[in-house]
């Protein structure tokens, strides 16, 4: 494909949502894994979250390797590896084998999630780059939804293992399509190699700045309650409202569209001069209220679904605001990439502990521990938000969108 064409951009997006599907695909089959391997909800939560270990530990090294071999080759090789991981998961006879496969599977969050935006940014410019990166930023809810939908047909049946075969087959197709990915133009590749040492220095120097740390912690807390809620909602709805996990997972998958709507809405308001802190405060109240009602067992199922939609809407909007603030928390504008690296690493560590924590709280039967996690997560995310001095608008975003 031609570098920077919409065909190549959509192909990169395809790889990215397949990566995020690795997390969502285990949620509908949690109970099946527990029965098959005689494990606990926390054990399944560990299997879900262990894919974050690779990116938390190896992001810097992985980025250096991608700089050397190029994003195109990194994406293709990673896709082949994930096919193998899914095959191992399909034939796994114990949680140890499944966890080992999942640990290796986490390489995709370096080999693809790091390489994908690098490829987009190196092959696009101007307004097309802005639109392409905006599209790519929605891979999280889209990919998580895809993972849910992949597993729903097999949840609660003897064929639950076929979830891994379907996911692996999609990655096999992706690997075959890898030859269509564009190469980074020679000038861009050479520039990337010459500046590799400088970018590595930027990544380490960002650790000494307080504002990027605050934003990273605020984002990690928000993502944690979002991932945790998405992990337990199918089982919680099934238990509380007496529906199947497959039905509950399907509802969550469809409702995830609200996250994209919330993100786009928040971005629009920021470009119209709204203060980020004012928006975030309003969204926090909405997120806390909907999060509380989401776990209220005395409400009807239809009301619970409405609360879920509002919850996802506020979460998507809050993430969009945090991403819009990213360029403003660094002292040196050239360190935006380093700040993004710090944000991703902190989030990866949080994602590792979130599913086991939430699943262990779900096992307590009472919804109060889950409500406490949600409310405290929103409050702390607001407290750490590095915007209390106030940013009247996000000029960079505004100018870019226009």
Image (spheres, helix red, strand yellow):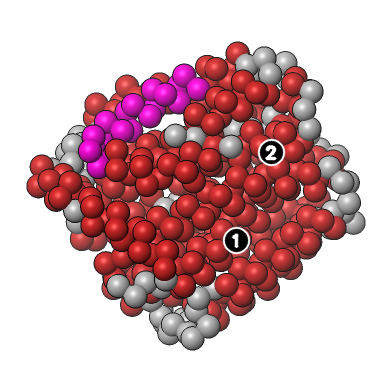
Image quadrant of residue 339? bottom left
Relative to the observer, which residue lies in front, 304 or 189? 189
Q: Position of residue 182 (x, y in %)?
A: 20, 36
Which residue is labeled 2 in the image? 45
Q: Which mark is residue 374?
A: none
| Residue density around tag 2, few if under 14, some if 14–19, many if 20 or more, within 10 Å | many
Q: Position of residue 276 (x, y in %)?
A: 49, 77
Quadrant where the image shows the C terminus? bottom left
Which residue lies at the image location 66% right of the left edge and 48% below the top edge? 354
Q: Is residue 280 left or right of residue 124?
A: right
Give the Cα separation between the discs numbered 2 and 1: 18 Å
Residue 7 visible to an observer of this rendering: no
Which residue lies at the image location 19% right of the left edge and 53% below the top edge? 195
Q: Is residue 210 above or below residue 201?
A: below
The residue range painted magenta reads 66-85
Residue 94 visible to an observer of this rendering: yes
Q: Is residue 318 above or below residue 54?
A: below
Looking at the rendered structure, the secondary structure element under dot 1 is helix
Q: Position of residue 288 (x, y in %)?
A: 71, 67
Q: Main secondary structure of the magenta part?
A: helix
Q: Residue furthest left?
A: 187
Quadrant where the image shows the N terminus? top left
Q: Magenta span has 357? A: no
Q: Is residue 87 left or right of residue 332?
A: right
Q: Position of residue 47 (x, y in %)?
A: 64, 33
Looking at the rendered structure, the secondary structure element under dot 2 is helix
Which residue lies at the image location 43% right of the left edge and 35% below the top edge? 108
| Residue density around tag 1, few if under 14, some if 14–19, many if 20 or more, within 10 Å | many
Relative to the observer, which residue lies in front, 379 or 266? 379
Which residue is labeled 1 in the image? 222
């Amino acid at each position: 494909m031609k570098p920077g064409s919409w065909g190549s951009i959509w192909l990169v997006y395809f790889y990215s949502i397949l990566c995020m599907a690795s997390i969502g695909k285990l949620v509908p089959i949690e109970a099946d894994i527990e029965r098959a391997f005689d494990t606990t909800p926390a054990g399944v939560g560990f299997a879900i979250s262990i894919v974050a270990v690779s990116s938390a530990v190896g992001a810097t090294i992985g980025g250096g390797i991608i700089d050397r071999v190029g994003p195109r080759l990194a994406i293709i090789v990673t896709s082949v590896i994930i096919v193998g991981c899914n095959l191992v998961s399909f034939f796994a006879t114990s949680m140890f084998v499944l966890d080992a496969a999942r640990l290796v599977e986490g390489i995709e969050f370096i080999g693809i999630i790091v390489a994908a935006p690098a490829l987009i940014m190196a092959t696009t410019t101007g307004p097309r780059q802005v639109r392409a990166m905006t599209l790519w930023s929605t891979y999280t809810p889209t990919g998580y939804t895809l993972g849910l939908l992949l597993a729903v047909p097999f949840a609660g049946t003897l064929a639950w293992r076929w979830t891994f075969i379907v996911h692996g087959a999609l990655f096999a197709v992706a690997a075959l399509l890898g030859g269509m990915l564009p190469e980074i133009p020679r000038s861009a590749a050479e520039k990337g190699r010459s500046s590799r040492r400088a970018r590595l220095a930027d990544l380490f120097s960002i650790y000494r700045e307080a504002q990027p740390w605050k934003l990273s912690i605020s984002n990690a807390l928000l993502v944690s309650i979002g991932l945790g809620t998405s992990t337990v909602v199918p089982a919680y709805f099934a238990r509380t409202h007496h529906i199947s996990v497959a039905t509950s997972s399907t509802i969550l998958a469809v409702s995830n569209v609200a996250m994209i709507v919330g993100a786009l809405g928040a971005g629009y308001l920021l470009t119209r001069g709204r203060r980020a802190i004012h928006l975030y405060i309003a969204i926090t109240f909405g997120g806390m209220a909907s999060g509380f009602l989401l776990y209220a067992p005395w409400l009807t199922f239809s009301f619970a679904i409405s609360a879920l939609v509002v919850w996802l809407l506020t979460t998507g909007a809050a993430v969009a605001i945090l991403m819009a603030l990213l360029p403003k928390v660094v002292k040196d504008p050239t360190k935006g990439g380093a700040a993004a690296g710090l944000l991703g690493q902190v989030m990866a560590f949080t994602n590792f502990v979130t599913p086991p924590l939430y699943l262990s709280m779900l096992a307590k039967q009472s919804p109060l521990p889950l409500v406490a996690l949600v409310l405290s997560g929103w409050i702390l995310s607001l407290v750490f938000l590095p915007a209390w001095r106030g940013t009247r608008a996000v000029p960079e975003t505004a100018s870019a969108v226009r």
